[in-house]
Amino acid sequence: MLSFESFKQKSPIQRFLLILSLLMFIFFVVIGFMFIFWKGLNLGTIQAYRVPIGIFFILYGFLRMWSLNRKSNT
C-alpha cells in the first residue's frame, strides 16, 4: 500500500501526479456508484445498462489504483 515515507521522498511532480491519480480513482468510483444507485440520473442510457456501466467505472477506478500502487513500489 502507499506509505507516508515514500510520499515524502517523491519529487513535487510525482506527488502532484499521485494526488491527481487518487482524485481520479475517487472520481471513477463515485461516477460508478452514481450510475448504479442514482435513479434521477438520466443520460439517455437504457435502464438495463446502468449497472454494467457503473461496475465498469468502479473496476476501472480500482485498476488505475492498482497500477499506481505497482508503479510506486518499483
Image (cartoon, rainbow, N blue to C red):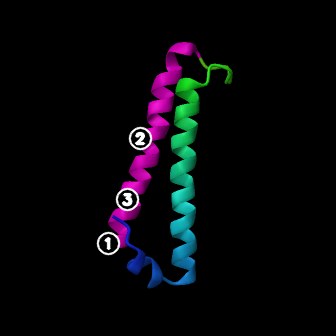
Q: Quadrant of residue 66?
A: bottom left
Tell me whether circle 2 and circle 1 mark residues in contact (CB < 8 Å). Answer: no
**Which label was assigned to residue 73?**
1
Closer-to-camera residue (9/47) = 9
Density class for disc 2 (Cα within 10 Å; few <14, some 14-19, many ≥20) is some
The residue that disc 3 covers is 67
- At a point 42% along the width and 55% down the height, the residue shown is 65
**Which label was assigned to residue 59?**
2
- Say which amino acid is labelled 1: Asn
C-alpha gap between disc 1 and disc 3 = 10 Å
Asked whether 39 falls inside the magenta stretch, the response is: no
For residue 5, side relative to residue 47 (left or right)? left
Precedes in sequence: disc 2 or disc 1: 2
- At a point 57% along the width and 63% down the height, the residue shown is 20
Precedes in sequence: disc 1 or disc 3: 3
* Quarter occupied by the C terminus: bottom left
C-alpha gap between disc 2 and disc 3 = 12 Å
- At a point 46% along the width and 47% down the height, the residue shown is 61
For residue 9, side relative to residue 12 (left or right)? left
Find residue 64 and report its horizontal and vertical position in percent.
43, 53
